[in-house]
Amino acid sequence: MPANPHRGEVEALLDGAPRRLRLTLGALAELEQTLGAEDLTALAARFESGSLRASDLAAVIGAGLRGAGAETTDAEVSRMEIPGGASGAARLAADLLKAAFGA
């Protein structure tokens, strides 16, 4: 079943397999804690600044996978093959955040 954009879902190819990702409220709360953001506004501002670490990307993608029901860790995400490498991971994280927060 394809991703449902009305539910904030994004589909991506990870390790050669199509996967669904979704930043649920719980996944966003996890990101706040993991990244030390005070609130959702601070979390959004952090990503809008464009100053991202690889660990930030792994955290967003990991939270998106877990939000869609997968059991995976950020460490596992950091070892996944993502088309486009780091820039592909950045695009995927941006797509997830856009789906969660709107355009």
Image: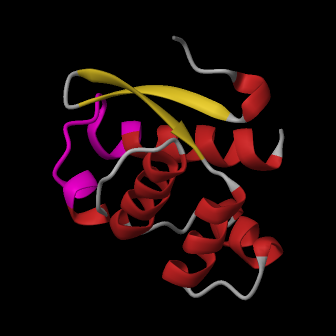
Image coordinates for residue 33, horizontal then vertical, percent: 57, 83
Between 75 and 89, the one nearer to me in the picture = 75
Image coordinates for residue 36, horizontal then vertical, percent: 57, 88
Residue in the picture at 32% in, 46% down: 86
Residue in the picture at 62% in, 50% down: 23
Q: Quadrant of residue 7?
A: top right
Magenta highlight range: 76-88
Quadrant of image for the C terminus: top right
- From this view, report whether residue 31 is shown above or below residue 64: below
Residue in the picture at 35% in, 69% down: 55
Image coordinates for residue 87, horizontal then vertical, percent: 39, 41
> In the shown orientation, is residue 93 left or right of residue 79?
right
Between 91 and 37, the one nearer to me in the picture = 37
Residue in the picture at 26% in, 22% down: 17
Q: Quadrant of residue 84?
A: top left
> In the shown orientation, is residue 1 left or right of residue 85?
right
